Image (cartoon, rainbow, N blue to C red):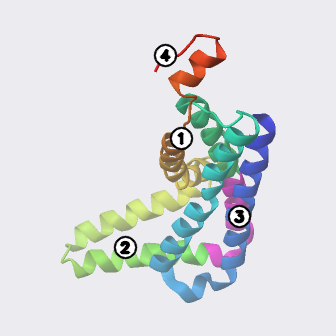
Amino acid sequence: MKKTVITFGLISGAISALIGVGTVPFLDKVGAGSTEILGYTTIILSFLMVYVGIRSYRENVGNGEIGFGRAFAVGILITLISCACYVATWELLYFNVSSVHAVMDEYSSNMVKQAKASGASEVEIQAQLQQIERFKKLYQNPFYNSAITFLEPFPVGLVITLGSAAVLRKRKSLDANYAAQGVPISK
């Protein structure tokens, strides 16, 4: 299981990392809303390797069989490795590339604009500004930043893992089990 998990986890992580790094030059051109859509599209694309990894394990290690529990274990481990790659890439980008900080500033600015457009009072807007500044300060802590960043892809990976494990589970039929044990089957 280790080889399958590491192989497909790293492939999934490489996909998310490469697309993440490849989009950095365009961050200031696409805007905060489009960045979110692009980010989650990247996450979903990279987690397609969860399905492929479970299927590979079923066919190559399980001789065409895999239960839900084993499929889930394979998938969640691939997800965790992929998430670790995603977090490591984000940490490198966030703390070393200035255009990534600009996206955070734009996102904060958009939140304030939305509050003003919704008719929020000046007190509510100031409270939101204080909350944004508190978040920005917390986000400068690499541990907090890593935890928040991990929470972006993990739920998507969990859903894809559950779905893949359910779809790919495959057991021998009852007749095949009886035949393997030498029990005669009457028809």
Q: Are marks 1 and 2 in contact (CB under 8 Å)?
A: no
User: Is 97 one of the magenta-colored residues?
Assistant: yes
Q: Secondary structure at mark 2?
A: helix
Q: Which residue is mark 1?
A: 165
The residue carrying mark 4 is 186
Q: CA distance from mark 1 to mark 2?
A: 38 Å
Q: Can the viewer see residue 117 in this picture?
A: yes
Labels 4, 3: front one: 4
Q: Which of the two marks, 4 or 1, is nearer to us in this view?
A: 4
Of callouts 4 and 2, which one flags the residue occurring earlier in the amino acid sequence? 2
Q: In the rendered structure, which amino acid carries the disc numbered 1? A: Ala
Viewer-proximal residue among 149 and 18: 18
Magenta segment boundaries in residue numbering: 85-100
Lateral position of residue 137 relative to residue 94, left or right: left
- Residue 149 within the magenta-colored segment of the rendering: no
Q: Earlier in the sequence, mark 4 or mark 3?
A: 3
Please state which of the two labelled residues, at mark 3 or mark 1, is closer to the viewer. Answer: 1
From this viewpoint, which residue is outermost toward the bottom? 29
Measure how far apart labels 3 and 2 are at the Cα level.
30 Å
